[in-house]
Each structure stands twice: as structure tokens, then as C-alpha cells.
Amino acid sequence: MGRTRGGSGAKNGRDANPKSLGVKKYAGEFVTAGSIILRQRGTRIYPGANVMRAGDDSLFATADGVVVYHERMNHKLVSVEAAK
């Protein structure tokens, strides 16, 4: 017979907080430099022109402009067309 006899309450009760991943700015939206465009885990979408990748793989704008999503060589990219 087992020694613990059912009392498994200490093994329960863990739950991670939600991480709010996903697209924050959609195509056609105006962004300022430093604005987060997309939060992701891994590079599902790659940075294009005027966009850089943060340490947690989020993508952010490096210039003011309009967000554009496109595809190149089977990679999805997001770029920012700089405002003049």
C-alpha cells in the first residue's frame, strides 16, 4: 500500500500567467519608432525594413511609418514604410 494515500493537494495549484502574444499592429497602421508590432516565441515572422527583433523575438519598429506584411522566399516578413 502506498504511503501518501491520496493527499495530492501540494502537487496541484500551478498555472502560468498568459503572455499576450500575437500581432499588436496590423497592416496599414501607423507606428512610431520603438513601437512593438508583434510578440512571438521564435521567429514565426521575420523582420524586414525598419524593423528589428528583440531578445524575446518580438518585432519592433525602428522608424516612424506604416506597417506592411509581405512574403519573400517562403518567409513571412513585416516592414515599416518610413514616413517622409
Image: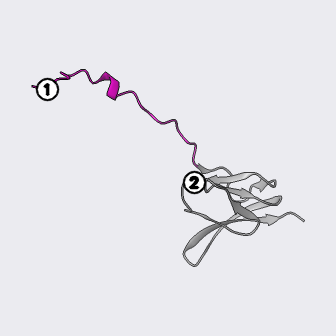
> Circle 1 is placed at which residue position?
2
**Which residue in the protein does label 2 denote?**
40
Residue positioned 83% across, 58% down in the render: 64
Task: Kindly report the secondary structure that dominates the magenta region of the rendered protein.
Answer: loop
Q: Does the magenta portion include 18?
A: yes
Q: Cβ–Cβ below 8 Å for labels 2 and 1?
A: no
Q: Quadrant of the N terminus?
A: top left
First in sequence: mark 2 or mark 1?
Answer: 1
In the picture shown, does residue 13 fall above or below 43? above
| Image coordinates for residue 31, horizontal then vertical, percent | 78, 54
- Residue farthest along the front direction in this orientation: 3
Badge 1 element = loop
- Mark 2 vs mark 1, foreground winner is 1
Q: Which residue is at a point 64% across and 54% down the rendered structure image?
A: 38
What's the magenta region? Answer: 1-21
Question: Hey, what amino acid is under mark 1?
Answer: Gly
Q: For this rendering, which residue is in front, 28 or 81?
A: 81
**Foreground residue among 4 and 26:** 4
Q: Residue at x 20, y 22 (%)?
A: 6
The residue nearer to you, when weighing 74 against 17, is: 17
Q: Which mark is residue 43?
A: none
The extreme left residue here reads 1
Give left or right: position of 21 versus 80. Answer: left
Q: Label 2 is placed on what type of residue?
A: Gln
Describe the element under mark 2 as helix, strand or loop: loop
Q: Percent position (x, y) of residue 3? A: 16, 23
Q: Is residue 11 left or right of residue 62?
A: left
